[in-house]
Image (cartoon, rainbow, N blue to C red):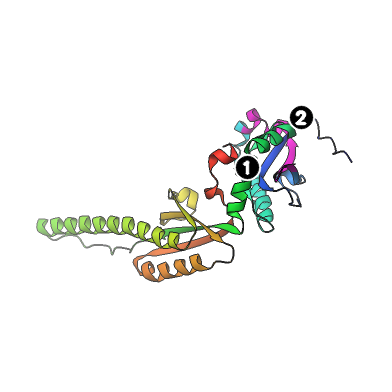
Amino acid sequence: MSEPAPPPSAAWYVYGVVSATTQPEGTGIGARPVELVPEGDVAALVSVVPADEFGEASLLERLNDRSWLERTAREHEDTLERALARTTVVPFRLCTVYESREHVVEFLSAHGPALAGLLQRLEGRIELGVKAYFAGAAAPEPDEPQSGREYLLRRQREREAAEEAARFKSEFAQASHEVLAAAAEEARANPPQPPELSGRADEMLLNGAYLVRRDDGRLAEAVAELESRFGPRGVTYELTGPWPPYNFVPPEVVGT
């Protein structure tokens, strides 16, 4: 039976790559069916989308539309997480779009061995994220200094406290990442997010990604150990996931 013809002016939105034996399910972007484009041992997880919405020129404009971007990102992630629950996934970045099915097949043909090797390396593994925030101790409201000497001493103590806090934050972030990396197969320390991205007023000191086996609880145990160690100093941790292993996919393999 021949495949149904795509709609006019169609584009192929690629969520990621899976084994060619995977059975697609559900819907993705814009409630469009999730399909498979196989080539050899691997296959692209795709949805056929309107080219007038996902063409290069349209995307540049739509990426500035916050509501569109949030909805598309949510649908992208939902599709990948649904696949991740059933199989190993090489995730692609948001809005990876090809002009035709043939272009998707060409990509898979060119990168097939590397993608198959990556699927094998990632098999049975997930990405977990750990963010650490520093609130610090609230300083009491100082009384007005009674003399110039008292003022100078106070300023000196404030400088020393600021220097100590800076040392602690630097040493804490490195020590935390080292402990977490020892509990994972691979680890990445990404730049901390500013409050407008993290959604928290506390300063983010660690934004780590860790590749672990699905059934391995050592990372959660390491987070609990760090909380008991650094919590009294004003540090809180946030463990998230499981996520598709974005941070452990070499850009050259997925063509980005």
Query: Quick check: is 39 in the magenta stretch?
Result: yes
Whether residue 92 is visible here, answered yes or no, is no
- Secondary structure beneath disc 1? helix
Query: Quick check: is 74 in the magenta stretch?
Result: no
Q: Is residue 70 above or below residue 140?
A: above
Left or right of residue 159: residue 81: right
Q: Nearer the viewer, residue 125 or 147?
A: 125
- Residue 206, by quadrant, is bottom left
Q: Amino acid at mark 1?
A: Pro
**Residue found 69% across the figure and 58% down from its top:** 86
> Alpha carbon of mark 2 to alpha carbon of mark 1: how far?
31 Å
Image quarter of the N terminus: top right
Q: Which residue is mark 1?
A: 113
Chain part drawn in magenta: 37-59
Q: Residues within 10 Å of mark 2 (few under 14, many from 20)?
A: few
Q: Which residue is mark 2?
A: 9
Picture coordinates of residue 47, whole percent (x, y): 73, 42
Left or right of residue 103: residue 94: left
**Residue found 39% across the figure and 63% down from its top:** 235
Q: Residues within 10 Å of mark 1 (few under 14, many from 20)?
A: some
- Secondary structure beneath disc 2? loop
Q: How many marks?
A: 2
Q: Amino acid at mark 2?
A: Ser
Image quarter of the C terminus: top right
Q: Is residue 36 above or below residue 222?
A: above
Indicate which disc, 2 or 1, sits on the residue closer to the N terminus: 2
Picture coordinates of residue 240, whole percent (x, y): 54, 60
Whether residue 157 is visible here, answered yes or no, is yes
- Residue 145, by quadrant, is bottom left
**Residue found 74% across the figure and 37% down from its top:** 49
Q: Residue furthest top?
A: 57
Left or right of residue 53: residue 214: left
